[in-house]
Image (cartoon, rainbow, N blue to C red):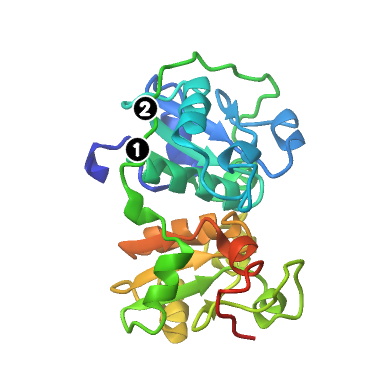
Amino acid sequence: MSSEDNLLPLIAEPDQLAAYIDEPSLLIIDVPAKAESYDHGHVPGAVFLDHRRLLRGEGEVPNDVPSPEALSGLFSSLGLTRDTHVVAYDDEGGGWAGRLLWTLELLGHTRYSYLNGGIHAWRADALPLTTKSHTPSASDYEAAIMHPEVAIDRHEIQERLGDRDFALWDARSKAEYLGEKGSNKHLGHIPGAVNMEWTHAMDPQRALRLRDYAELITELEALGLTPDMEVATYCQSHHRSGFTWLVGKALGFEKIRGYAGSWKEWGNRDDTPIEK
């Protein structure tokens, strides 16, 4: 579906969402890092999503994509239908909201928006809040991986290392990237990856909205990331890189992909190449 068919743009401002708040086809999802953020006040009509349900939660790579069965149960419980336009937000500037939207894209559900700045921007604009929890009407959503190209796995990354039209965006802190910090078996970064920490794309002066697009593109190009390239983004668990995936999409990177295994997988293996 083209963006012209969507109620709201990919990056929606609080006043744009406020204008459509009563639209029946809208599903507003609050997926905070801290659950109490929802209880302290959320966008009217927003449903709460425990961000842990966006992760597999078991096995060697617990941060991997949940099974289609688990995702079917999750999105059915949220009341998602093929006609729903999802607006996602969180309390941290876009990490968990980005992971949610990346998951929807993976499933081929492309009617979605991110509330720019999340609850911080909504509050800063003095828009109405409620502490009343909203229980959605359950649906019968059948999840299937319709857009597998939105994800990339470690095998493909290893095959693509050194390709001129392929790049890696490490969204972790500089210390993690340099191998000075971390809880994995091996520390460092994927060979050739460049580092721009996820929070660097947020504007703290504007309630954590995305920074100026032209400035971000200039900075990413200086690192060697250009919109015509295929870019894979990762962090420790594809939470922070859920946001950098979204940023890339907003900036016109049409071939931006998320590595769900991220450093949790890469840095705990003995057969994956590492740079420090």
The answer for how far apart the CA atoms under marks 2 and 1 are is: 9 Å
Across and down, in percent, residue 47 comes to 58, 26
Q: Mark 2 highlights which residue? A: 84
Going 48% across and 28% down the picture, which residue do you hit?
Answer: 75
Q: Is 126 left, or right, of 157 in this rendering? A: right
Viewer-side label of 2, 1: 1
Q: Which residue is mark 1?
A: 109
Q: Position of residue 230 (x, y in %)?
A: 34, 70
Q: Amino acid at mark 1?
A: His
Q: Does residue 12 appear anywhere in the picture? A: no
Depth check, front residue: 183 or 10: 183
Horizontal arrangement in the rendering, residue 155 relative to residue 206 (left or right): left
Vertical relation: 90 (above or below) 162: above
- How packed mark 1 is, by other alpha carbons closer than 10 Å (few <14, some 14-19, many 20 or more), is many
Residue 144 position by quadrant? top left
Residue placed at 41% from the left, 81% from the top? 221
Number of numbered labels in the structure image = 2
Q: Residue 33's x, y, as percent?
A: 69, 45
Quarter occupied by residue 248: bottom left
Please, what secondary structure does the residue beneath circle 1 have?
loop
Above/below status of 189 relative to 149: below
The foreground one among 110 and 24 is 110
Check contact, mark 2 vs mark 1: CB within 8 A.
yes
Task: Find residue 140 and name its label.
Answer: none
* Image quadrant in which the N terminus is located: top left
Kind of residue at badge 2 = Thr
Q: Is residue 61 visible?
A: yes
Image vertical order of residue 68 relative to residue 269, above or below: above
